[in-house]
Amino acid sequence: MIKVLYFAWVRERIGVSYEMVETESETIIGLVDELRQREPRYEIAFSDLSALKVAINQELCDFDTKLSGALEIAFFPPMTGG
Amino acid sequence: MLVSVQSNDFDIGKELEFLNNSDRNNGAIVSFQGVVRNNSTNSLLHMDIEQYPGMTQKAISDYVKRAMERWSLNDALVIHRHGKLFPGDRIMMVATAAMHRHDAFQSAEFLMDYLKSRAPFWKKEVTKDGYHWVEPMLDDEKALERW
C-alpha cells in the first residue's frame, strides 16, 4: 500500500486529500493510468499531466520514476510559493 | 540556519537582529519580505496558502543548504507562512548574512527564485465571487535557469 496525497486543485477534483492505494504498477505513470481507469474524477484530475508535478517520498521526480521504495506519492499543480 | 513554516506572523526586526548577533564576521545582511498583494481589480478578500506538510520544511532546508555551499554565507533564514492571509500581510521572509554583500544578495535571490517555484505551497485567491488557484508565472520558472 502506498499513501497517495493530492494538493490544491488536484485535491479538489479528486475529493480527498490522501488515500491508501494498492497498485500493481511499476512506475508513477502506470499508477496514474490505473487511477484514471477507476473513476471519472481521476480522469479529470489527471487529464493533462503537463500541468502536474509529482513527488516520491517528499522529493520531486518525473512521471516515469519507478515506484520501488515509494512510501508516499504526491500529485499537485506547479507550486506558487514566495 | 533557520527554516520555519508557520501560520503565525513574525517580527522581521527581531529575526534580523538574531541573525546579526549570531556571527561577528557579518559584513552584509540582505533581507526580503513577501507581502500579500491585492489583485488587479482590488477585489481580493484573502488568500489561502496550502502546503505539503513535511515536504515544505525539507525542500526549503535543501535549498538553504545549497545556497550555503555555493556562496560564502555565515547564516541564512527562511520563514514562510501558510493558511489564511489578507492583503498587506507578510507571507514570507528570506535573509542571508555574509562577510560581503555580493554573496548575501546573490544567495537571497537564488533562495527567492527557488521558493517561488520549488517549495510546495499553493496560493488560492478568494474574492466575493468565488476563488481561483494562482497560476505560476512563466518568468518564475525561467528565473531558475540562471542558477
Image (tube, coloured by chain):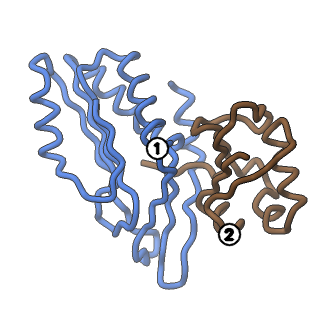
Chain colours: A brown, B blue
List the residue tagged with mark 1: B56
- Using residue B42 as the reference point, say whether residue B94 is left or right of it: left
Q: Residue at x 45, y 60 (%)?
A: B49
Residue A58 position, x and y percent, is: 57, 39
**Viewer-nearest residue: B88 or A17:** A17
Percent of width and height locating residue B21: 9, 29
Give the secondary structure at mark 2: loop
Q: Which residue is mark 2?
A: A15
Q: Quadrant of residue A48?
A: bottom right
Above or below: residue B3 compared with residue A45:
above
Residue, x 34% and y 69% (percent of image)?
Answer: B86
Looking at the image, residue A80 lies above or below residue B2: below
Q: Quadrant of residue B87?
A: bottom left
Identity of the amino acid at label 1?
Answer: Thr
Label 1 and label 2: CA atoms lie apart by 22 Å
Q: Quadrant of residue B15?
A: top left
Q: Which amino acid type is shown beneath numbered disc 2? A: Gly
Q: Chain of mark 2?
A: A
